C-alpha cells in the first residue's frame, strides 16, 4: 500500500503498481487530510437513484456509541431525512442518517438507510455500506477503511467515529457539487477507484473559538463544527471567558453572564450561552464526533469576572466592563479565599455540563500577577479541576508553575524555543501545538486588514501548513506532542464573513498536520488538494481567502 502523499510523485514516475499509483494520486489530489495509505480498489462506484445506505453491525462492536465523549446526540432518529444542522446520534445508524442528510439534497436520490442482516457479509452487499466492527485493531478509535467496487463503497471501522471520518472522505471523493443543498441534475456521482486505510497521526486535533472578544451564536458555533468535521478535527476548544466578556451562565454566580457577558470588543451587546445553549453545543459537537473543551481563563484575562463580583479583586472595587483589545492588565486576587470559592463554583458547574475529559484553565499573559502569585494560583486551581474529574489543559505558561500529573499544555509561542516546556515534557507533561506564527487563524495572511492581527507575523496558507508539530519545539522528546490546535481569536472578528476569511484556507492545513502521517507532508502535493476544496467552499457559502499561493480552479 502506498502512502498517499508520497504517491503523487510516484504516479508521475514508472511504478510497478500503476493502478495503485493512479488511485493514490487521485485521492491525494482531492482529500484533505490526505489519507495514510491508498491502493487500488475494485473499480469506481457510481451512486444511482437505486443506491441505499446500508448499516452493518450497528450498535455492536467496540466503541459503539462513539468515542466523542458524552451521550449520543439526541436529534433526528436514525434514517430520518435530517438536513445539515440536525444533531444525529453518535452511532453507526446515526452516521448513516448523517450521510443520507449530506447526499440526498445534491443527488435528489432517496438513499434509504437500511440495516443489513447480521448474516450478510458487508462486502457482498451493494450500495454505500457502513460496517461497524472491523477486525483490524490498528484502526483504533478513529481509523477507517474505505473500499470501492463496481457494486459498493464499503466504509468499515471499529467505532462510529471511524465510520464518520470515512464518510468525510467519501464526501471529498465525490464531485464538489455534493456540497450543494439543492439537486444538481446531470452530475455524475462517481467515487473513484480506491482502497483506503486511514488512521490519525494525533489523538487531539483541535480548533478554538474565542467567543469572549466577540460573542458567537450557537448557530455560528454549530456551523463551524460542521466545517471542522469535514477535516476530521475532533476537538472544539471554547475560550469562554476573557476581559471583554463572560459567555457561560453559572447558576451560583449569575452576574458573571448577565453583567459580565453584556458587552464585547467595540462595545456591542455581547451575549452568553445559557446552560441549555452550552448543552446544545456539546451535543451537536458530539454528533459530529467532536469533544468540547471549555476554557475558564485565569488569573489574568478576568475583567468581566472582576466587574461582576468585585470581591475577586484585591481592592474589592469593581473595574468597569472592558471593550478594548489590550491584554495583561487584570488579575484575580490570588491570596483571597473568595477566589477559590468562586473557582470551585465555576469549575464544578462547567465540569458537570461537560462530558469531555478536559477543562482548560488558561494561564496566559498574567502580567499583572506576580510570579509567586501565579504559581500559587495554579497550585490551587489545578486540584479543583481534577477533583471534578477533569484533565487540566493550560496555556504553556503553566509549565513555569507545577503542572499536575496528566496535565497538558498548549504551546502558543512563536520561536520554537521554550526550555520550560521541554523540561516539563521530559517530566511527562504532554503538549498541544498551536504556535502563533503558524497555527493562529487570527493572524493576517499578508499586510492588510481588518480582519486579523500580525503580532506573530503574517501567516499565509503555506506558512500555516509547512511545519512539523513534532519538531517545531527544539528538544522536545519524541512522543510528547499530543496534538495540534488552530485557535481563532476574535478581537477583529466582527462577522461570520470575517471568521470564514481567517479560517479558510488555513484551517484544513492544521487539520492535515493533525491527521496525516508525517511522511505525506509536502506543500506542493498539498496545494493541489487544497485547491480542490475551493469549489466545495463556494457551494457551502464559505467566503474563503483566495491565497495567491494556491491555483484555485474556476468554480
Ligand atoms: C494571545 C493572547 C490572547 C490574544 C491572542 C491574539 C494567547 C494564548 N493569549 O494568545 O489573549 O487574543 O494572542 O492573537
Image (tube, rainbow, N blue to C red):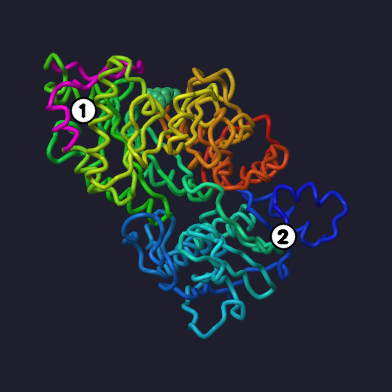
Q: Mark 2 sits on what residue?
A: 1
Of all residues, the one furthest to the bottom in this rendering is 119
- In the rendered image, the vertical position of residue 235 relative to residue 269, given as above or below: below
**Helix, strand or loop at disc 1?**
loop
In the rendered image, which quarter is residue 120 located in? bottom right
In the rendered image, which quarter is residue 217 located in? top left
Please tell me which residue is depicted at 57% across the width and 70% down the height of the picture: 128
Where are the magenta residues, as a range? 317-344
- Residue 372 in the figure: left or right of residue 312: right
> Where does the image place residue 275, in percent across and percent down from the top left?
22, 45
- Residue 485 in the figure: left or right of residue 273: right
Give the prevailing secondary structure in the magenta stretch: loop
- Quarter the N terminus occupies: bottom right
Mark 1 and 2 residues: CB-CB less than 8 Å, in contact? no
Whole-angstrom CA distance, mark 1 to mark 2, is 56 Å
> Where does the image place residue 458, in percent across and percent down from the top left?
57, 22
- Quarter the C terminus occupies: top right
Q: Mark 1 sits on what residue?
A: 260
> Where does the image place residue 455, in percent across and percent down from the top left?
49, 17
Label 2 Cα crowd, 10 Å radius (few <14 / some 14-19 / many 20+) = some
Indicate which quadrant contains ligand 1: top left
Query: Any magenta on residue 321?
Result: yes
Amino acid at each position: 500500500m502506498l502512502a498517499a502523499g508520497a504517491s503523487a510523485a510516484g504516479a508521475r514516475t514508472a511504478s510497478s503498481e500503476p493502478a495503485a499509483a493512479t488511485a493514490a494520486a487521485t485521492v491525494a489530489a482531492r482529500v484533505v487530510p490526505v489519507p495514510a495509505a491508498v491502493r487500488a480498489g475494485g473499480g469506481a462506484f457510481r451512486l444511482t437513484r437505486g443506491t441505499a445506505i446500508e448499516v452493518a453491525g450497528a450498535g455492536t462492536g467496540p466503541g459503539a456509541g462513539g468515542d466523542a465523549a458524552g451521550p449520543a446526540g439526541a436529534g433526528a432518529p436514525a434514517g430520518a431525512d435530517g438536513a445539515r444542522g440536525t444533531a444525529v446520534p453518535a452511532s453507526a445508524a446515526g452516521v448513516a442518517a448523517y450521510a443520507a442528510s449530506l447526499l440526498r439534497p445534491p443527488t435528489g436520490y432517496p438513499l434509504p438507510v437500511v440495516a443489513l442482516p447480521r448474516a450478510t457479509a458487508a462486502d457482498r452487499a451493494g450500495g454505500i455500506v457502513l460496517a461497524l466492527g472491523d477486525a483490524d485493531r490498528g484502526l483504533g478509535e478513529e481509523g477507517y477503511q474505505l473500499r470501492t467496487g463496481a457494486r459498493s463503497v464499503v466504509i468499515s471501522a471499529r467505532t462510529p467515529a471511524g465510520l464518520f471520518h470515512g464518510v468525510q472522505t467519501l464526501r471529498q471523493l465525490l464531485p464538489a457539487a455534493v456540497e450543494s443543498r439543492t439537486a444538481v441534475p446531470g452530475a455524475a456521482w462517481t467515487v473513484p477507484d480506491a482502497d483506503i486505510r486511514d488512521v490519525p497521526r494525533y489523538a487531539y486535533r483541535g480548533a478554538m473559538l474565542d467567543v469572549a472578544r466577540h460573542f458567537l451564536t450557537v448557530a455560528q458555533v454549530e456551523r463551524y463544527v460542521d466545517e471542522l468535521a469535514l477535516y476530521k478535527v475532533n476537538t472544539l476548544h471554547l475560550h469562554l471567558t476573557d476581559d471583554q466578556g463572560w459567555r457561560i451562565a453559572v447558576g451560583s454566580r449569575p452576574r458573571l453572564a448577565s453583567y459580565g457577558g453584556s458587552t464585547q470588543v467595540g462595545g456591542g451587546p455581547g451575549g452568553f450561552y445559557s446552560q441549555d445553549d452550552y448543552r446544545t453545543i456539546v451535543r451537536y459537537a458530539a454528533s459530529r464526533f467532536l469533544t468540547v473543551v471549555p476554557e475558564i481563563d485565569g488569573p489574568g484575562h478576568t475583567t468581566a469576572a472582576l466587574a461582576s463580583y468585585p470581591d475577586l479583586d484585591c481592592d474589592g472595587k469593581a473595574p468597569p466592563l472592558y471593550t478594548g483589545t489590550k491584554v495583561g492588565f487584570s488579575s484575580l486576587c490570588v491570596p483571597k479565599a473568595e477566589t477559590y470559592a468562586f473557582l470551585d463554583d465555576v469549575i464544578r458547574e462547567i465540569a458537570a455540563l461537560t462530558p469531555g475529559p478536559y477543562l482548560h484553565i488558561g494561564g496566559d499573559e498574567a502580567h499583572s500577577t506576580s510570579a509567586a502569585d501565579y504559581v500559587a494560583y495554579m497550585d490551587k486551581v489545578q486540584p479543583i479541576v481534577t477533583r471534578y474529574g477533569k484533565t487540566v489543559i493550560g496555556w504553556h505558561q503553566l509549565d513555569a508553575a507545577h503542572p499536575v500529573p496528566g496535565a497538558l499544555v498548549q504551546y502558543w509561542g512563536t520561536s520554537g524555543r521554550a526550555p520550560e516546556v521541554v523540561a516539563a515534557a521530559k517530566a511527562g507533561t504532554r503538549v498541544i501545538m498551536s504556535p502563533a506564527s503558524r497555527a493562529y487563524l487570527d493572524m493576517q495572511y499578508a499586510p492588510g486588514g481588518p480582519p486579523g492581527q500580525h503580532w506573530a507575523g503574517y501567516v499565509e496558507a503555506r506558512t500555516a501548513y509547512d511545519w512539523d508539530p513534532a519538531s517545531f519545539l527544539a528538544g522536545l522528546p519524541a512522543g510528547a506532542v499530543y496534538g495540534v490546535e488552530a485557535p481563532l481569536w476574535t478581537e477583529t472578528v466582527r462577522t461570520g464573513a470575517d471568521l470564514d476569511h481567517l479560517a479558510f484556507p488555513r484551517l484544513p492545513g492544521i487539520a492535515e498536520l493533525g491527521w496525516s502521517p508525517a511522511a505525506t507532508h509536502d506543500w506542493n502535493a498539498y496545494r493541489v488538494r487544497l485547491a480542490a476544496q475551493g469549489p466545495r467552499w463556494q457551494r457551502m457559502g464559505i467566503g474563503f481567502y483566495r491565497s495567491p499561493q494556491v491555483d484555485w480552479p474556476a468554480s
